[in-house]
Image (cartoon, rainbow, N blue to C red):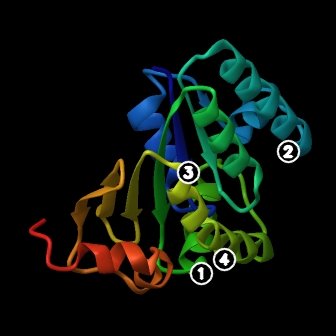
Amino acid sequence: MPQLWVIAGPNGAGKTTIADRWFAARIPVISPDYFAAQYNLHPFQAGRRALQKQEQLLREGISFAVDTTLSGNRKLALMERAANAGYKVNLIFVCLKDAALCHTRITERTTRGGHTVPIEDVVRRYNRSLSNLNKAIDLAERFFVLDNTGKNRRLLFSMKRGRIKYLSNKLPEWARTWIPSNLLKQSRGLAL
């Protein structure tokens, strides 16, 4: 069964690092940033190229991953279409404590030759990304929520086919606010 891996979260949260380290050697990772850098494309053209590539892979039934802020509805629609096409849909959502830290990480990345993102886009996408988390969780057969605020990335929550696999006893504020409350309530009293 082909798989779709959606690596989602705000700009600067560490999505590309996860995609590169965990997936790039095994399956195609679709990212507009990759197309922009590889082919020297304007962001709009790079986004269009990424969409074309993901549609091709979906038609061919090939496993792939996408790197996305999840700040719009396109990737949610992709998740739904992939599930309907027989894909196993997986979500990895990675976040930081706030948009300010995301912007700080982007600034650091820029000094190493990475791309920049205007602060107003970072703030807007941070909020939209989190607001779309519940919808994405509903579309995923398996999902993982990670916090990348500290020195080491931390698994906060995971679920597979509606069953909680792990829930951290120390959730940061953003996770307590945005992980669906029904899932957190469902996990009470479970030996994790």
Q: Is residue 190 above or below residue 185?
A: above
Q: Which residue is mark 1?
A: 100
Give the mark, 2 or 1, whose residue is nearer the N terminus: 2
- The amino acid type found where label 1 is placed reads Ala
Q: How far apart in space, not on screen, are marks 3 and 4 (Cα)?
A: 20 Å
Q: Nearer the viewer, mark 3 or mark 4?
A: 3
Q: Is residue 55 left or right of residue 154?
A: right
Q: Can you give x and y, in whole percent of width and height, for residue 39 in the image?
A: 80, 26
* Residue 153 appears in the picture as rendered: no
Circle 1: is it few (<14), some (14-19), or many (20+) Cα within 10 Å? Answer: some
User: Does label 4 or label 1 sit earlier along the sequence?
Assistant: 1
Tag 2: Cα neighbours inside 10 Å, few (<14), some, or many (≥20)? some
Which element type, helix, strand or loop, lies under badge 1? Answer: helix
State the CA–CA distance, disc 3 to disc 2. 27 Å
Residue under pointer 4: 127
Dot 3 surroundings within 10 Å: few (below 14), some, or many (20 or more)? many
Q: Give the foreground label among 3 and 2.
A: 3
Instruction: Read off the residue under disc 2.
Output: 43
Element carrying mark 4: helix
Seen at 71% across and 69% down, the residue is 125
Distance between mark 4 and mark 1 Cα atoms:
12 Å
* Image quadrant assignment for residue 16: top right
Label placed on residue 139: 3
Q: Residue 154's x, y, as percent? A: 29, 63
Which of the two labelled residues, at mark 2 and mark 4, occupies the earlier sequence position?
2
Secondary structure beneath label 2: helix
Quarter of the figure with the N terminus: top left
Is residue 112 at all visible to an observer of this figure?
A: yes
